[in-house]
Amino acid sequence: MSSVATTSGRPAIIAGRGGMLGAISDFLWRNPRLFLVLMLLPPLLWLGVIYIGSLIALLLQSFFSIDEYSGLINREFTLKTYAELLQPSNLDIIIRTVVMAAAVTVGSAIVAFPIAYYAARYARGRWKALFYLGIMLPLWSSYLVKIYAWKLILAKEGILNWFFAKIGATWIIDAWLALPVVGGNSLSISATGTFIVFVYVWLPFMILPIQAALERVPGSLVEASADLGASPAQTFRNVLFPLALPGIVAGSIFTFSLTLGDYIIPQIIGTSRLFIGQAVYAHQGTAGNIPLAAAFTVVPIVVMGLYLWFAKRMGAFDAL
Amino acid sequence: MTPAVSFQKVSRHFGSVRAVDAVDLDIAQGEFFAMLGPSGSGKTTCLRLIAGFEQPTSGEISIFGESAGGVPPYRRNVNTVFQDYALFPHLNVLDNVAYGLMVKGVAREERSRAAEEALSLVALPGYGGRKPGQLSGGQRQRVALARALVNRPKVLLLDEPLGALDLKLREQMQEELKSLQKQLGITFVFVTHDQGEALSMADRVAVFNDGRIMQVGTPQEIYGKPATRFVADFVGSSNVLPPDFVQRYAGQKRWGSLRPEVIRVATDATGDGVRGKVVALNYLGAATRITVDADGQRINAVVASGGKLPSPGDDVTLTFNRDAVHLMEGEA
């Protein structure tokens, strides 16, 4: 021990302290729980009080009712507003929205999977950067600009009709538009048009989670499946799809809930029939029927809850 | 007899990299064949060429006499045990093992029975209900083996299957693999970078370097009569002797190799033999390796630890039989 000597005469293991900031960091290091509380407090206040709090305040309104003659809100607990929700005209809105959201979700998953698969398994370096840019770029431009662009593309005089006319396939569009429910006078004022634009707008939210899920599937699993005699279709069904399912479910939470709540796309592109978002907008704005608007807001929350419960029961999160 | 696997002038290039370069190779039916080499030597690419994950850039591969050109992996009667085992994490052990039968359309009951049988073969009966994540490394290894064997492959490919196991388990698995291969009579092609593993398990060994095969032979041939300096150096730590040295002590001006355990070390620096100075001693347990510097030529000798040993710095005389110096035919 005698051969080891420090010049300052004190043990070298404890380095000098860094003033008040040093004392604070030492104190927090010794009290990790306090540190955690300090880190989480601001976001929890923001989310918990301001956001969730106002949401609960809104939901409470759904248990009030509106006086049909005076238009005043009667602040007494009642389920009358929910009964109103189940009237055929309102139920119609709910069913239309949920069916559209489900169709958009399935449509985006089908379009997104090959793109995500390519990005996860083949794209490297520059191509990967290009992939992220391609996915993100549409998110950088205004949502309204994109929707109006689609209105022009889908219009009767738009580029899509022009292209189909050029290749002599106008009859395909005409035949499709002649169908009930999905058809209409032109694509831009049909449910099909609404569907196409929803799929386009929410696609990045589906691609990215699927890509993240596929990224975690080792290439050797796909090779092992082929090695054991599975054709590419069997490998997709038995290995890739089940392992990508958590990503698909994560993506579908976005596409499903965003479609359930959107009120701008169906207003600009599609028929004049209302979606939930439009109904909420109309009832809380011009009609001043806050209780019914609040009750409509509860619907997507309940639907999403049921959806997640069902997805969990089906084992969608088992591979997580 | 038709070879189980045959390579004719097979090359696989990745851009400018020649991963496999004009390889000729015949693997006999029922043989335990090891591909030995350092990482990047092309041995794993050769295995992937047999499995069908890679296609040769040029040359021809045939499996049991049938050309494998353009045949996808799922149409080859060849199964692989992957280095990382590649067990399907969302399926339990039984479904993993039965996977190959499931995709071939074998009925559930029959494939469960076959999978149970395969699991008993690898000493894991009753583990069918667990998920791969609940198993230890050694158990996963056995499941991967059972999953491949349940398909009754004509050739079983093993890609460094023991690399991730600890020493004790590795030795145990080496023995089990060897006896399993004898019992089933399936051709095993085993890729490894561990020369001890290759020598102790294989009937024949191919030593790879830079995408080429340096030598093919029985473990005795590879160890005792290395064809090139690389083989002598990579397999079994032989002393590689330059032509001048060999001419002085064994008569011919050729590259030679000398196994360290045939060298005798005398502590008195008199009499005939190679004079040198001890540089280092490495205690290996039963034996001790003595590194000697003889006029700039490093020579390793391995002697029993029990006797009288020299110390670093001592002058010693090394003696060996002339015949013990092996002349390498692969070197000019």
Image (spheres, coloured by chain):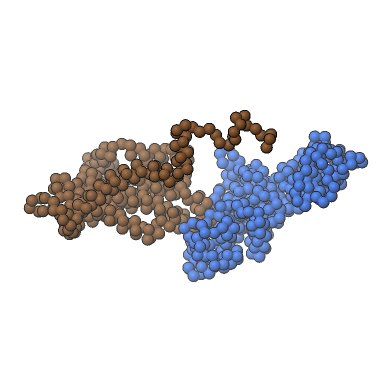
Chain colours: A brown, B blue
Q: Position of residue B248 (x, y in %)?
A: 86, 38
Report the number of discs.
0
Judging depth in this view, the residue of B252 and A77 nearest the camera is A77
The image quadrant that residue B232 belongs to is top right
Report the side of A85 relative to A229 (left or right): left
Judging depth in this view, the residue of A133 and B188 nearest the camera is A133
Outermost residue toward the right? B271
Q: Measuring 24% from the left and 41% from the top, which residue is drawn there?
A: A151
Report the side of B267 relative to A5 (left or right): right
- Asked whether the viewer can see residue B258, the reply is no
Report the side of B247 relative to B214 (left or right): right
Q: Position of residue A228 (x, y in %)?
A: 53, 58
Q: Measuring 67% from the left and 62% from the top, which residue is drawn there?
A: B179
Judging depth in this view, the residue of A166 and B111 nearest the camera is B111
Q: Measuring 37% from the left and 51% from the top, which residue is drawn there?
A: A250
- Asked whether the viewer can see residue A136, the reply is yes
Q: Position of residue A117 (x, y in %)?
A: 43, 47
Outermost residue toward the left? A69
Judging depth in this view, the residue of A101 and B5 nearest the camera is A101
Outermost residue toward the front? A9
Q: Position of residue A131 (x, y in %)?
A: 41, 40
Report the side of A301 relative to A247 (left or right): left
Q: Measuring 56% from the left and 36% from the top, which residue is drawn there?
A: A14
**Quadrant (top left/top right/bottom left/bottom right) for the C terminus of chain B:** top right
**Quadrant (top left/top right/bottom left/bottom right) for the N terminus of chain B:** bottom right
